[in-house]
Image (spheres, helix red, strand yellow):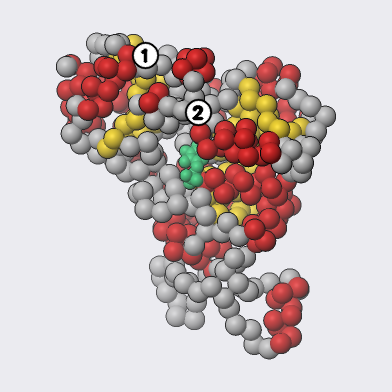
């Protein structure tokens, strides 16, 4: 569906109707497929004839989701996985080997840091973590066997913005791939492949579903690289269930309008929070006060739906704000139509040492909000109670 715009692709890309000519995308709950003959079975197995064989490699509902997400990211190819973490694992397993090296931005999603820092290290793949916005640090971390640059932008929870185009140039100069975890912005707000990245990874669990129902993940990008990821996936098996793929496929239809509405509310909340007494600082790429505001406005359509802010009075005051909410959900999750609030220092970042937390800028008074689709007035009222207390 190359000539169509994003909005058209979001509702129509990937459709392949069955003999019943259904209008809405069908959900194929089948683990295997039958062949017309022994010769066809052989041709399908050898790959000579395209078609479905077994749901660990292919399923029409999963294919539809992959094609739609590929269209939205502007990718040649896409493979879906059971979760965001299995997407990241499959990306590494498909493209790297023992002795290779990763350069990653600091402050990645906790499980990604664990995967790179602890699990991959056991198999001889080392990772250097560098400050997310320091381009010289990425260059300085390069080694002869650096094969992959991996970043999240904006970062969690401080919304630091990485210059994707500049980093793509550094990575390619070193013969490495650049992968961007596009979970926070989604292709509705940011298209890393257009900016020079080779691969995009997703936790589809977040905004792509957008309504907190299922887990899923995806890797999208250049066909020959995605093919290597697919080879790992079809053999090792961290594949997505057709049901989850179907939920995400339908979630993609409303992705842009959700992201724009939630981002508009987030901007309004960020401006309001900046003016509240007792709020020391607001981290949101859409604010002029954000250190990478200009870059963010160049590479993102808007600031996104996630912001964080620091209150005076440390943990005690931050917890009071959390506990004074009556409507906002207290959870570490994000990417939902329901607004969530998190105290990173005691939850998502609770297992790292206090010194490391302080060095990373995660203060005791920091709170993260992932803004949903509720009325902004209700959200303000729910936070105002705790801020005033
Ligand atoms: C949640 C998340 C992941 C992991 O995704 P799962 O679907 O939970 O496995 C990876 N990256 C980011 C930025 C996330 O927020």
Dot 2 or dot 1: first in sequence order is 2
User: Which quadrant of the structure image shows residue 32?
Assistant: bottom right
**Closest to the observer, 8 or 377:** 377
Looking at the image, residue 90 lies above or below residue 311 = below
Front in this rendered view, residue 105 or 60? 105
Q: Position of residue 2 (x, y in %)?
A: 60, 54
On screen, residue 47 above or below 279: below
Mark 2 CB lies closer than 8 A to ligand 1:
no
Q: Which residue is mark 1?
A: 281
Residue placed under numbered mark 2 in the picture: 155
Q: From this view, report whether residue 65 is shown above or below residue 125.
A: below
Residue at point 42% right, 74% down? 22
* Position of residue 209 measured from the top left corner of the image (x, y, whole percent): 41, 50
Quadrant location, the N terminus: bottom right
Q: Position of residue 349 (x, y in %)?
A: 45, 27
Q: CA distance from mark 2 to mark 1?
A: 16 Å
């Amino acid at each position: 569906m190359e000539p169509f715009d994003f909005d058209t692709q979001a509702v129509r890309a990937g459709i392949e109707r069955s003999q019943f000519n259904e209008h809405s995308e069908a959900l194929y709950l089948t683990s295997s497929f039958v062949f017309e003959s022994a010769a066809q079975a052989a041709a399908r197995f050898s790959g000579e004839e395209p078609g479905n064989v077994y749901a660990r490699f292919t399923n029409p509902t999963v294919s539809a989701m992959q094609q739609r997400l590929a269209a939205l990211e502007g990718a040649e190819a896409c493979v879906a996985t059971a979760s965001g973490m299995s997407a990241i694992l499959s990306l590494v397993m498909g493209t790297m080997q023992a002795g290779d090296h990763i350069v990653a931005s600091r402050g990645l999603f906790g499980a990604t840091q664990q995967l790179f820092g602890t699990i991959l290290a056991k198999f001889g793949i080392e990772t250097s973590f560098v400050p997310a916005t320091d381009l010289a640090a990425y260059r300085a971390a390069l080694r002869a066997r650096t094969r992959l640059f991996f970043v999240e932008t904006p970062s969690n929870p401080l919304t630091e913005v990485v210059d994707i185009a500049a980093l793509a140039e550094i990575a390619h100069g070193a013969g490495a791939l650049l992968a961007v975890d596009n979970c926070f912005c989604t292709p509705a707000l940011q298209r890393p492949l257009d900016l020079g990245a080779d691969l995009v990874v997703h936790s589809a669990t977040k905004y792509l579903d957008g309504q907190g129902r299922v887990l899923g993940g995806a890797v999208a990008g250049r066909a020959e690289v995605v093919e290597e990821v697919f080879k790992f996936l079809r053999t090792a098996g961290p594949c997505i269930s057709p049901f989850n793929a179907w939920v995400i496929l339908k979630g993609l239809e409303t992705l842009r309008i959700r992201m724009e509405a939630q981002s508009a509310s987030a901007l309004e909340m960020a401006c309001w929070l900046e003016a509240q007494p007792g709020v020391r600082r607001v981290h949101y790429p859409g604010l002029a006060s954000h250190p990478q505001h200009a870059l963010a406005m160049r590479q993102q359509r808007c600031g996104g739906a996630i912001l964080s802010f620091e209150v005076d009075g440390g943990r005690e005051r931050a917890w009071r704000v959390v506990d004074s909410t009556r409507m906002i959900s207290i959870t570490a999750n994000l990417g939902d139509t329901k607004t969530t609030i998190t105290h990173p220092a005691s939850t998502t970042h609770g297992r790292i040492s206090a010194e490391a937390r302080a060095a990373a800028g995660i203060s005791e008074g920091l709170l993260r909000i992932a803004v949903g689709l509720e009325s902004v007035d209700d959200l303000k009222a729910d936070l105002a109670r705790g801020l005033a207390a």
